[in-house]
Amino acid sequence: MPEALRALEPDAAVLVDRERWITFEPTEQAASSGFIFYPGGKVLPEAYAPLARALAEHGHLSAILPMPLNLAVFNPDAASDVIAAYSGIQTWVIGGHSLGGVMAARYAYHHQELVDGLALLAAYPEAHIDISQSDLVVATIYGDRDGLLMLNEVEHSLDQLPPDTQVMLIEGANHAQFGWYGDQAGDRPARISRSEQHARVVSAILRIMQEAGR
């Protein structure tokens, strides 16, 4: 969408690098915290540029990771290369949308020594992934108008997440509005604007970034 394309443009506040990953860095001072994002299945990574840019505007390095065939399942450990490349980052949070969130949860489970937090956007972990006893700071964020997510599975998955997981059900939000790529087949019409849903998601992730850095 046009909003995503505009978010990819660097300016005085945010540097944008698209050479290897799509990274956004604040210019005012070096970031000490970073957010790694796995895109949803078959969604172009650029569609999440407004989210990543918003985090950078609040002082966090953020990186969207392109995936083979736009499917994170083909490179679930991609975050390790980003973490290795930015040795100055002290706090890492990983997240993802839909299938990307599933793979982000898998990464967090297998690499708890590398990441401090996890943000699930319209996603829940695989049945064998149990991080309920971990020290990870976790948020699960989903909408009640999501036509592609089994809402009852999100609720069932909470037992696999830490007891203090932040659960945000956004009324009126659907599946596609977690990104900026337009409508998606099988989804239900949202009852809030994409901008409003975006703002709620950004706010939730910023809280996770703050808590993970403590």
Image (tube, rainbow, N blue to C red):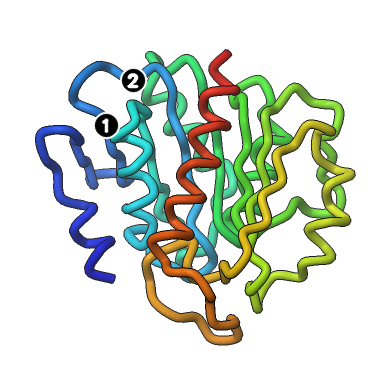
Q: How many marks?
A: 2
Q: Residue at x 84, y 33 (%)?
A: 163
Callout 1 amino acid: Glu
Question: Is label 2 in a helix, a strand or a loop?
Answer: loop
The image quadrant of residue 86 is top left
**Residue beneath label 2, please?**
31
Callout 2 amino acid: Ala
Residue 73 visible: no
Q: Residue at x 45, y 80 (%)?
A: 183
Q: Residues within 10 Å of mark 2 (few under 14, many from 20)?
A: some
Q: Residue at x 18, y 58 (%)?
A: 6
Q: Nearer the viewer, residue 65 or 184?
A: 184
Q: Is residue 102 left or right of residue 47?
A: right
Q: Is residue 117 left or right of residue 49?
A: right
Q: Is residue 56 left or right of residue 190?
A: left
Question: Is label 1 in a helix, a strand or a loop?
Answer: strand
Q: Which mark is residue 71?
A: none
Residue 161 visible: yes
Assign the C terminus to one quadrant of the image.
Answer: top right
Q: Position of residue 42 (x, y in %)?
A: 48, 71
Q: Residue at x 89, y 44 (%)?
A: 159
Q: Position of residue 72 (x, y in %)?
A: 55, 56
**Residue beneath label 1, please?**
25
The image quadrant of residue 74 is bottom right
Asked if the residue under mark 2 is in contact with the one under mark 1, i.e. CB atoms within 8 Å, the reply is yes
